[in-house]
Amino acid sequence: MNDILFKILRISGLPIIFRELIQRDKVTILMFHDINRSTAKRTFSYLCENYNIISLQDYIQAIEKQDKSKIPNKALIITFDDGRIENYRLLGLIKKFRIPITIFLCAGVVDTDRHFWGKLNDDSIDIQGLKKRSNKERLEILSEAGFKQDKEFDEPQALQRKHIEEMKQYVDMQSHTIFHPILPRCSTPQARKEIFGSKKLLENNFKLKIDAISFPNGDYSKREIQLVKEAGYRCAVTVDFGFNTMKTDPFRLKRLSMNDTDDINELIVKSSGVWDFFKDLI
């Protein structure tokens, strides 16, 4: 059913209206996780043809200096959360299209054979339900199912050192905490460790300059904002719907979730913001 809706919305012309009128003087940030190479090629091609791709770093610098001179119309930032191993296969396309993407890494999962708890394939576990539990309860339930966040498996799910070293010349790599907990469900010491610790691990282990963080699952509170500031980050991205301007709080940057779609109609509709704007009404 959604496939039909995406096609109807694309044909309606609303994505063009949103892009040319609403997004024209805004900065749009898109969120991906894991798209294959063929999907990425189609995605990058469409976005480059219809938007002006800029780096997250350039946008943050523009906000800090309140200088919009280097921010073009229809500016768009491409981000990936988690740092999944499949992201490495996109490096050739990133070079080809010359796009400055940002990948937010889970510092305790990259360069290991540990797995992402959100990708656990166990019918007895309600992953969405776990996100509403306290961090302690979440870890206990996962442990009972045989999953521990520091458990090493047979194959990696995250980028390895060799990938990061090769990619970091072309990709802005930033923090997505250590183990991707739902931060507001953590105790203050746990949240502090995830926010401060991920920055330290990535900087020390991979010589990266870490000044941005993506909140896991997009969840945050005033406490997390304060901790992020104390840790020395310059910005934080959420999954709050909307577009960004020079007046947007850099620690509450809005993003549009792309759901790793391989449907060109869905890509066009979602990247314009039309879907998030209307989905509750449909």
Image (cartoon, rainbow, N blue to C red):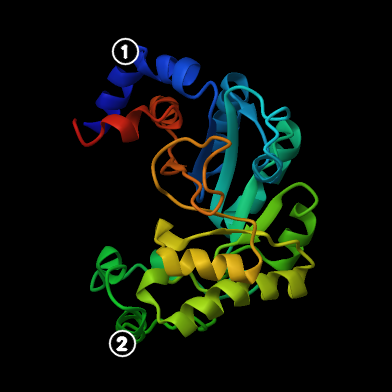
Placement of the N terminus among the 4 image quadrants: top left
Please tell me whether residue 62 is drawn above or below residue 123 in the rendered image. Answer: above
Which circle marks residue 144 in the picture?
2
Kind of residue sitting beneath label 1: Ser
Mark 2 residue crowding within 10 angstroms, few (<14) / some (14–19) / many (20+)? few
Could you say where residue 17 lies in the image, as x and y percent from the top left? 41, 14
Could you say where residue 107 lies in the image, as x and y percent from the top left? 61, 71
Left or right of 76, for residue 93: right
- At x 59%, y 65%, the residue is 229
Distance of label 1 from label 2 (alpha carbons): 50 Å
Judging by the rendered image, the residue that carries numbered circle 1 is: 12
Kind of residue sitting beneath label 2: Glu
Left or right of 226, for residue 105: right
Left or right of 247, for residue 217: left
Placement of the C terminus among the 4 image quadrants: top left
Q: Quadrant of residue 60?
A: top right
Q: Nearer the viewer, residue 70 or 166?
A: 70
Q: Earlier in the sequence, mark 1 or mark 2?
A: 1
Q: Nearer the viewer, residue 5 or 194?
A: 194
Mark 1 residue crowding within 10 angstroms, few (<14) / some (14–19) / many (20+)? few
Q: Nearer the viewer, residue 263 or 221?
A: 221
Give the secondary structure at mark 2. helix
Q: Quadrant of residue 6?
A: top left
Could you say where residue 26 lies in the image, as x and y percent from the top left? 53, 29
- At x 47%, y 67%, the residue is 224
Give the secondary structure at mark 1. helix
